[in-house]
Image: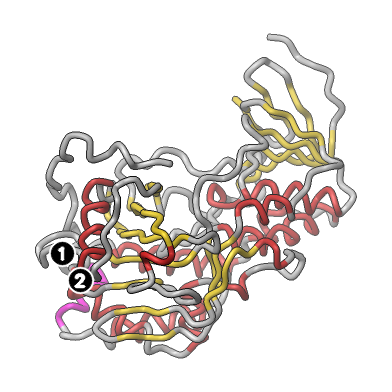
């Protein structure tokens, strides 16, 4: 094995998704010597990233946002307007806001990471005072998953359902063609700021996830219910990843520091991770500069308790029927704004989170459905559910 004599730097970041690129960028601006590693460092990210506007750090410029929704809509048994601005991030705008001009960027695949070394596929060894692993998540397996199939529709065609400046965060209206005896899913639909609207049928919490062909069928049923006819040539994207794969890392161990979705920052109930990761980048860098353990700084006990309580919510999501899901979200979206934020985005507001979880269960009706939420009944509902086989050719539009 050949070993190159690479000078040790302050920080090596492995993986240049939004999280890794932001970490390398902010560390570079803080005066640290940075090496970044990614097989395709200039590739534009494939997924569509969204978040609440108030989650984003102040240092991120407005150009990173593609479109804003002042008050997104949630449909349960009734319509809820969430008075909290929401946004879709611009892929090019976000990347351009995170230049790496003074960092060493290496286009290569890392095969081994530890606390101070990164080995590349060609045998090169990179040495750093600290190594961060920001490579995203491994394969799903049979973990509890987020699954989604999104179709990009011209904004004019989409207007009967989602007009400019509007957005549907969760649409539980019974329009996807699924029966009450099938695993539940909801619609997510937002304008992307490029003349298109993404319609994305989404499933949360099922072990192994929901197949793409099933999600696509449900998306098309919803569009048809609103008189929206597609040409069949619209681009689309697939999402399929574990929600409970990576808990917060243990502190004080000699390891590359996992950060972002690989480091416990993926929300177990929603699958969101980018905004929380961006907001915590400076916390990690400040800890490095002060000689403290970044894991301890990122994950105080309050944040760990918050994550643990959210995983309890994930387990509940994965065993509910459609009717129970609607009842549960009805209860949740009548909570106070702080309670909603504690579940949806706050990194460590464990007191408000505990209160909103308790009140959501307490206000879910009928009473006996609460047993499903807490796991006393139907704990394994939907496990190994026999979805119908995909028709030939139904999967060929899964990725853009």
Q: Residue at x 61, y 45 (%)?
A: 17
Vertical relation: 82 (above or below) 380: below
Q: Are marks 1 and 2 in contact (CB under 8 Å)?
A: yes
Asked if one can make out residue 147 in the rendered structure from this viewpoint, the answer is no
Q: Residues within 10 Å of mark 2 (few under 14, many from 20)?
A: many
Please name the residue that numbered disc 2 is placed on.
372
Q: Judging from the image, what secondary structure is the residue with disc 1 in?
A: loop
Q: Residue at x 30, y 36 (%)?
A: 396
Q: Main secondary structure of the magenta part?
A: helix
What x and y, as percent, mark residue 56?
65, 68
Q: Residue at x 79, y 16 (%)?
A: 4
Direction from residue 251 to residue 261 in the image, left or right: left
Q: Which residue lies most toward the top here? A: 1
Quadrant position of the C terminus in the picture: top left
Numbered circles on residues, count: 2
The answer to which of marks 1 and 2 sits earlier in the sequence is 2
The image's mark for residue 378 is 1
- For the residues marked 1 and 2, what is the alpha-carbon distance in whole angstroms? 6 Å
Q: Judging from the image, what secondary structure is the residue with disc 2 in?
A: helix
Residue 72 highlighted magenta (yes or no): no
**Magenta region, residue range:** 368-376
């Amino acid at each position: 094995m050949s070993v190159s004599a690479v000078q040790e730097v302050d920080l090596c970041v492995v993986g240049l998704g939004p999280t890794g690129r932001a970490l390398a960028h902010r560390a570079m601006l803080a005066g640290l010597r940075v090496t970044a590693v990614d097989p395709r460092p200039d590739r534009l990210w494939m997924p569509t990233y969204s978040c609440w506007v108030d989650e984003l750090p102040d240092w991120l410029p407005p150009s990173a946002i593609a479109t804003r929704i002042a008050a997104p809509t949630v449909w349960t048994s009734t319509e809820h307007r969430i008075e909290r601005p929401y946004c879709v991030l611009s892929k090019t705008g976000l990347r351009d806001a995170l230049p790496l001009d003074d960092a060493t960027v290496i286009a290569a695949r890392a095969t081994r990471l530890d606390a101070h070394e990164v080995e590349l596929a060609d045998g090169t060894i990179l040495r750093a005072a600290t190594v961060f692993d920001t490579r995203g998540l491994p394969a799903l397996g049979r973990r509890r998953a987020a699954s989604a199939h999104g179709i990009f529709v011209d904004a004019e065609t989409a207007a009967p359902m989602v007009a400019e400046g509007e957005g549907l965060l969760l649409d539980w209206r019974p329009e996807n063609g699924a029966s009450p005896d099938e695993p539940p899913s909801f619609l997510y639909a937002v304008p992307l700021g490029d003349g298109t609207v993404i319609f994305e049928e989404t499933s949360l919490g099922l072990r192994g996830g929901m197949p793409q062909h099933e999600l696509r069928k449900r998306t098309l049923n919803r569009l048809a219910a609103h008189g929206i006819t597609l040409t069949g040539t619209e681009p689309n994207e697939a999402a399929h990843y574990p929600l409970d794969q990576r808990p917060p890392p243990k502190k004080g161990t000699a390891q590359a520091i996992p950060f972002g979705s690989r480091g416990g920052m993926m929300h177990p109930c929603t699958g969101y991770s980018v905004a929380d990761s961006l907001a915590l980048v400076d916390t990690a860098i400040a800890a490095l500069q002060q000689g403290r353990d970044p894991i301890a700084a990122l994950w105080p006990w309050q944040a760990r308790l918050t994550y643990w309580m959210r995983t309890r919510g994930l387990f509940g999501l994965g065993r509910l029927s459609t009717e129970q899901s609607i009842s549960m979200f009805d209860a949740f979206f009548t909570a106070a704004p702080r309670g909603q934020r504690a579940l949806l985005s706050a990194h460590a507001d464990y007191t408000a989170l505990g209160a909103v979880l308790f009140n959501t269960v307490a206000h879910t009706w009928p009473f006996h459905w609460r047993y499903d939420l807490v796991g006393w009944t139907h704990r394994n509902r939907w496990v190994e559910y026999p979805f119908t086989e995909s028709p030939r050719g139904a999967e060929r539009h899964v990725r853009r």
